[in-house]
Image: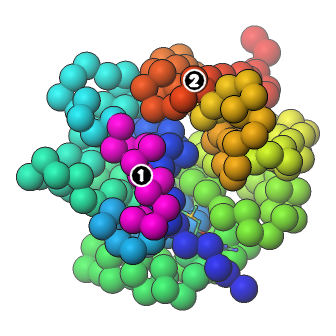
């Protein structure tokens, strides 16, 4: 049973960190004339109304994008600048009402020859994403289990691109199943960039995911984590304590750009939190 609804979390600190990184990856793909494909395996609704009952109930966006929004005309790290520019396009009158999901950020980067492949299993989110993608022939929408879709939709016919893996982790076995599915996908499509998001919770269950990702996956693997609080406050914090992402085959200098953006976000968006960037695997010369 799927109960997770991203509308409660849209624009929160985890979304902001994840989407800033995604904007950087999309920017790097669009730098070259060659077409690219984005495969987004857990697409969600596409776009979120911050005035909705769900967003208003948790107010997660108040601790995330609402803190950065007033800084949109100032100098910020490139990843943050790109995300704020995308959000400004959605909110042209300057009032922060709408927040983009990963499909909206990906669509904004597409040229005529690029493709966006979306997958979503929740029926309500699937309805929304289908309506959102209607009449755009560059976008296709699938309704499968995300890890099954990873096996079935990768590699895409355009052999340059990015796979976005952003599960809700409602089922605990996803932490162990994801690395196995990813290992098979990377072996089939070695040149692809793979972007995995994970939550950092009190019980550190993401450790199982990281341990799995460190085993036998070809390519370079980078990990970036943003903790929201520090010390005792972090130990006692309920719910999400931080947010993490892993990128297999990150583009050149993505690590330094994310370190700069992450450290800036730690200062600007968290209560004494910290950002860390580390290589899980580095190619040997
Ligand atoms: C964290 S949200 C995705 C947010 C989206 N990627 C974004 O950044 O805007 C996770 C999504 O995965 C969907 N989902 C949950 N389990 C799934 C599964 N087994 N296969 C595919 N989608 C699933 C949920 O309905 C939810 O919309």
Q: Residues within 10 Å of mark 1 (few under 14, many from 20)?
A: many
Q: Could you tell me which residue is drawn at 66 percent across and 62 percent down?
A: 167
The residue indicated by pointer 2 is 272
Question: How far across and down, in percent of the image, does residue 255 sit?
Answer: 57, 22
* Residue 101 visible to an observer of this rendering: yes
SS at circle 2: loop
The residue indicated by pointer 1 is 61
Q: Could you tell me which residue is drawn at 86 percent across and 36 percent down?
A: 214
Q: Which residues are magenta?
A: 55-67
- Residue 59 highlighted magenta (yes or no): yes
Examine the rendered structure and indicate whether residue 251 appears above or below residue 162. Answer: above
**Ligand 1 is found in which quarter of the picture?**
bottom right
Examine the rendered structure and indicate whether residue 93 appears above or below residue 271. Answer: below
Give the distance between the C-alpha atoms of the residues marked 1 and 2, in whole angstroms: 18 Å
Q: Is mark 1 within 8 Å of ligand 1?
A: no
Q: Is residue 44 left or right of residue 175?
A: left
SS at circle 1: helix
Q: Could you tell me which residue is drawn at 61 percent across and 57 percent down?
A: 166
Q: Could you tell me which residue is drawn at 21 percent across and 23 percent down?
A: 74
* Front-lying residue, 237 or 244: 237
């Amino acid at each position: 049973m799927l109960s997770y609804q991203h509308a409660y979390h849209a624009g929160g600190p985890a979304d902001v960190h994840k989407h800033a990184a995604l904007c950087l990856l999309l920017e790097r793909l669009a730098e070259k004339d060659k077409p690219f494909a984005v495969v987004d395996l857990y697409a969600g609704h596409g776009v979120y109304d911050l005035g909705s009952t769900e967003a208003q109930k948790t107010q997660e966006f108040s601790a995330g994008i609402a803190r950065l929004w007033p800084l949109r005309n100032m100098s910020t790290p490139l990843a943050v600048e790109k995300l704020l520019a995308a959000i400004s396009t959605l909110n042209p009158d300057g009032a922060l009402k709408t927040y983009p999901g990963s499909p909206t950020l990906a669509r904004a980067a597409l040229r005529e020859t690029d493709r966006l492949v979306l997958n979503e299993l929740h029926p309500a989110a699937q309805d929304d994403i289908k309506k959102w993608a209607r009449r755009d022939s560059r976008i296709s929408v699938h309704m499968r289990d995300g890890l099954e879709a990873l096996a079935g939709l990768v590699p895409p016919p355009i052999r340059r691109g990015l796979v976005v893996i952003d599960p809700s982790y409602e089922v605990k076995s996803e932490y162990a199943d994801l690395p196995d599915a990813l290992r098979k996908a990377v072996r089939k499509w070695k040149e692809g960039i793979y972007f995995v998001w994970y939550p950092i919770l009190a019980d550190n269950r993401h450790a199982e995911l990281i341990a799995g990702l460190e085993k036998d996956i070809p390519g370079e693997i980078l990990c970036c984590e943003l903790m929201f609080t520090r010390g005792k406050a972090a130990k006692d914090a309920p719910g999400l304590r931080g947010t993490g992402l892993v990128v297999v085959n990150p583009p050149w200098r993505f690590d330094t750009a994310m370190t700069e953006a992450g450290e800036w976000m730690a200062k600007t968006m968290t209560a004494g939190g910290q950002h860390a960037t580390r290589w899980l695997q580095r190619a040997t010369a």
